[in-house]
Image (spheres, rainbow, N blue to C red):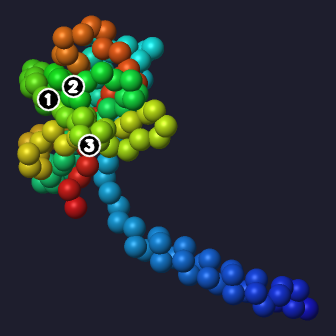
Amino acid sequence: MSIKAYLPVTNHRFLFATILVASMWLTACKRMDVFEKNVVIPNNQWAFSLEPVFDFTIQDTTASYNIYIVLRHTDAYRYNNIWLKVGTQSPGDKMRTQQFELQLGSDARGWEGTGMDDIWEVRKLITSSPVKFNKPGTYRFQVGQIMRENPLPNIMNAGIRIEKVQ
């Protein structure tokens, strides 16, 4: 006797539908090359001395990449923006830094990004167009806050996200 005889017809349909949906989902997904790493800010107090470092290995120098800053903060964060110092170091080169002002919200619209309860996460593109890395190897990124307040309260995580443009 086969297993079919023991299964009701509705289970066959459910199994078939599940397999069909799963196979369509798997074939529809494109591979996205992404690097993302976030560092927890101790006690939600981001001091000037804490400048997280992120190492990312580039092998495909023909591809273009988008670079994002990822921040998680509480609803109690006092400002609508944050000033950051972002350093980039190519293989064999010195660290070069730039300052960025990231808008996190406005009085009229509230916080940008996604929120759950009193925690907000924002991903901000820091390049005006996709970037090409000229050399294969390990690139280093460093992120520090340069606000007037030290330590800067209510910042939970800081990170970097690098996506290969498809």
Q: Residue at x 30, y 39 (%)?
A: 110
Question: Mark 2: few, some, or many residues within 10 Å (few <14, many ≥20)?
Answer: some
Q: Amino acid at mark 3?
A: Arg
Residue 89 visible at all? no
Q: Amino acid at mark 2?
A: Ile
User: Which quadrant holds residue 94?
Assistant: top left
**Element marked by disc 2:** strand
Question: Mark 1: few, some, or many residues within 10 Å (few <14, many ≥20)?
Answer: few
Q: Residue at x 48, y 77 (%)?
A: 24
Q: Nearer the viewer, mark 1 or mark 3?
A: 3
Please tell me which of labels 1 and 3 falls first in the chain. 1
Please tell me which of labels 3 and 2 falls first in the chain. 2
Q: Residue at x 78, y 91 (%)?
A: 9
Please tell me which of labels 2 and 1 falls first in the chain. 2
Q: Is residue 2 above or below residue 90?
A: below
Q: Residue at x 43, y 74 (%)?
A: 27
CB under 8 Å between discs 1 and 3: no
Separation of disc 1 and disc 3 at Cα?
18 Å
Q: Nearer the viewer, residue 123 or 115?
A: 115
Q: Is residue 34 above or below residue 141?
A: below
The residue identified by callout 1 is 101
User: Mark number for residue 109?
Assistant: 3
CB under 8 Å between discs 3 and 2: no
Residue 84 left/right relative to 52: left
User: How many numbered marks appear?
Assistant: 3
Q: Position of residue 40 (x, y in %)?
A: 42, 23
Q: Position of residue 11 (x, y in %)?
A: 76, 83
**Element marked by disc 3:** loop
Separation of disc 3 and disc 2 at Cα?
17 Å
The residue identified by callout 2 is 82
